[in-house]
Image (cartoon, rainbow, N blue to C red):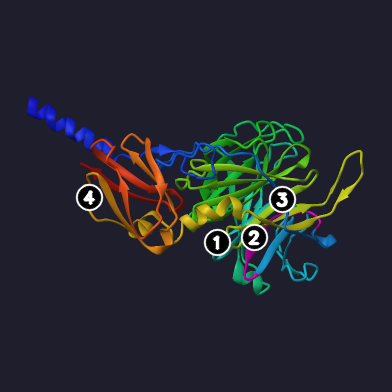
Amino acid sequence: MKKILLFAGFTIISYCLQAQISGCTDPLATNYNPAATKNDGSCIYESANISPVKSWNFPQIINETSGLVYWNQKFWTHNDDTDTNIYSFDTLDINTYTKHPLPHVQNYDWEEISQDSLYFYMGDFGNNTNGNRKDLKILRIEKNSLLANHPLIDTIHFSYSLQTDFTSTGSNNTDFDCEAFIVTNDSIYLFTKEWVSLNSSIYSLPKIPGTYTANFQSKHNVNGLITGATYLASKNLVVLCGYGKFLGPFFYLLYDFEFPYFFSGNKRKIGTNWTFYQIEGITTEDGLNYYTTNEEFTVPLIGNTINAQFHKFDLSPYLSNFLNASSENSIENISKNITLSHNPANSYLNIGIDHSLIGEKFYIVNAYGDTVMTGKLKEIKSQIDISKLHPGAYWIVLKNKRATVKFMKE
């Protein structure tokens, strides 16, 4: 019996030593835990506000711009009422645009455009008038046929799994409105615009033509109204845009999540220094610089008109660390550049690194996730005094480079 208990005890200890440590993994967060190896979505951030790098006025024909994507060296947008054209343009001369008609379709309320490699997807699902539409749909437009001026268009129809009551709610009084979605390899994910709760819920449905029930996945309190979304699949990054009280635009950054649970990772809200800007569309080329649109808006009582505009924002201060870490500086790649000459170690840990890691701050954490030592790697070959550590398993963590190496102290 003692042998069985002893074996069980070693099994439990071994499991605990190898188990991942959950916590906030983002160095930019106020509650960053350098010992954490698994992001649990708990990161908390200081408030931040940004202004556009540059802004352009749209021509009057695009005064109700509502969605935005970047493809084929051009930006593509559309209006949200009646107009059945897509417009392409570049930043060299925004007034020189190309109109791409979509024949034999109606624009009841086009609120968003998304894409994959072959198709544009146009969301005709604006539902804020009464909250009771039963004709929600997404148009799928083949890109090459659009360029050839003979667009091939089919339709994806859907309803929300949680909406069972279709009684009219009146204007801007429903949680079943939507102006943002992304497209993945096989699915569409909707991010709702919830006028009552100020949450955003995620619903999923297939991206092939048909009629579907969009399945509820999760929701998050964004304390605002989500109006646009852009997705970098290779980086595990979604950036939403929206506005709050007095039409104050904001960005909502979702990153380091467990796909497809987009609210499971880091969630950071970045405000702007504007009011009365009805931000609508968002896209990016590189994950650092973002382009947005706002539609024309006349301020009630005051009477001032905010022109429809196109803007460039720099989000690199908030995302470059994550994007760098998720590319060539992955845990696996960086960890290969760290060598321990004696492992297990006794009084000193002999560590070798390549030149790119010189100056990196390191943390030594124990099996319980406690940080027991910190320092900097100053040379290619360094000796770290670990004589005061108790025997057991430890990890040396280079969090800015997202590297983790395990060692044993004798």
Question: Residue beneath label 2, please?
Answer: 69
Q: Please, what is the three-letter code of the amino acid marked with disc 3?
A: Glu
**x then y, percent, for residue 122:** 65, 56
Q: Give the residues drawn in magenta, as a range.
A: 63-73
For residue 371, which quarter of the picture? Answer: top left
Question: Residue beneath label 1, please?
Answer: 116
Q: Please, what is the three-letter code of the amino acid marked with disc 2?
A: Val
Nearer-N-terminus badge (3/2): 2
Q: Please, what is the three-letter code of the amino acid marked with disc 1?
A: Asp
Nearer-N-terminus badge (3/1): 1
Q: Please, what is the three-letter code of the amino acid marked with disc 4?
A: Asn
Question: Residue beneath label 3, please?
Answer: 280
Q: CA distance from mark 2 to mark 4?
A: 51 Å
Q: Are dots 3 and 1 in contact, CB under 8 Å?
A: no
Dot in front, 2 or 1: 2
Q: Is residue 225 visible?
A: yes
**x then y, percent, for residue 180:** 63, 48
